[in-house]
Image (cartoon, rainbow, N blue to C red):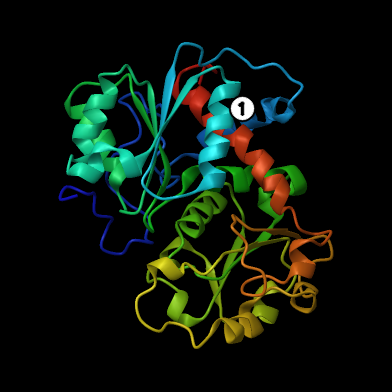
Amino acid sequence: MSEIYTPPPVPWAAARNSRNPQMDASGRLQHLLTLEGVSRETLHHILDTAESFMSLTDQDVKKVPLLRGKSVFNIFFENSTRTRTTFEIAAKRLSADVVNLNIEASSTSKGETLLDTMDNLAAMHADMFVVRHSESGAPYLMAQHLNRIGRKDIHIINAGDGQHAHPTQGLLDMLTIRHYKKDFTQLRVAIVGDILHSRVARSDIHALTTLGVPEVRVIAPQTLLPHGLAELGVHVYHDMKKGLKDVDVVIMLRLQKERMHGALLPSESEYFAHYGLTREKLAYAKPDAIVMHPGPINRGVEIASEVADGAQAVILPQVSFGIAARMAVMAILAGGTGA
């Protein structure tokens, strides 16, 4: 992909002095590409809309017709059963027609470019593309192309691009935190693990700071920390006991081994000894702290089973909240909520 968007030179620093490419001329969300630059008011509106859909996560509740007659194409160039499934459920509960594109059998595997594939799908009257790609910036490229060809009626949702962003995961994480903790402005939140390679960490940090969390901490070995964290106002720790002291929320991340180059860690067992979340380490957090994880979980690597299955874990509820969060994004982009 020769035209892939390239993030800023310091990829973790906040972008400045540029119009947010996911907004239209009036400042409304046209696409959801990142949580960076999204206002606090917009984030709260998405979360409020998601909460209104929470009852629809019950199988006995009828679908709503907000996306009736719309076509949603899930285009996943990376495997993710959980994310694709929740997007599919979300779209169907909004009454949309859903097409899951089989990338292994698609024309891109025969040499067709991403943009040619998108043009052909747009000709099939697509209304929304949900895109997951290993290259940072692929959804940006698609959004820019749609603007060039005048297709402002088609919306892009980034379902994860490289190491750049995972905005709907960030939104469902915020929905989870708000459900259990209510007020963002009174919290200490710790994000633990492979910060360097994590698009989830980046999206969570942007959302947490925008929503007014006064103290966001990251805990990781030096080899798994990116440059530019100080510009985002986060506090960096290398020791789990100090980093978890009196926190309200613990967000664990898996090791992104598929994105690592070179020997960044001595071994998984040593990593678990220092940075794996055990009952003993969790005891340094507040007694009512919640434990989150975007999945998939690697037990015995970043989290112990006794914690993952324990009373403070809200990992499975996160999945349910993910359906509501993705419904909210689709409904708002399609103009179905008056936003």
Residue highlighted by disc 1: 49
Tag 1: amino acid: Thr
Q: Is residue 20 visible?
A: no
Q: Quadrant of the rendered structure where residue 153 is?
A: top left
Neighbourhood count class around disc 1 (C-alpha, 10 Å): few under 14, some 14–19, many 20 upward: many
Residue 143 versus residue 109 in the image, above or below: above
Q: Is residue 209 visible?
A: yes
Residue 271 versus residue 257 in the image, above or below: below
Residue 206 at what x, y percent from top left?
48, 52
Tell me if 44 is positioned left or right of 130 in this view.
right
Q: Residue at x 53, y 31 (%)?
A: 88
Residue positioned most to the front: 105
Q: Residue at x 79, y 74 (%)?
A: 279
Tell me if 221 is positioned left or right of 259 in this view.
right
Nearer to the camera, 172 or 129: 129
Q: Residue at x 35, y 76 (%)?
A: 261
Helix, strand or loop at label 1? It is helix
Tell me if 316 is positioned left or right of 26 in this view.
right
Residue 2 versus residue 326 in the image, above or below: below
Tell me if 33 is positioned left or right of 86 in this view.
left
Q: Residue at x 74, y 63 (%)?
A: 308
Q: Quadrant of the rendered structure where residue 179 is?
A: top right
Residue 248 versus residue 316 in the image, above or below: below
Residue 56 at what x, y percent from top left?
70, 25
Nearer to the camera, 306 or 104: 104
Residue 296 at what x, y percent from top left?
59, 58
Residue 74 at what x, y percent from top left?
42, 34
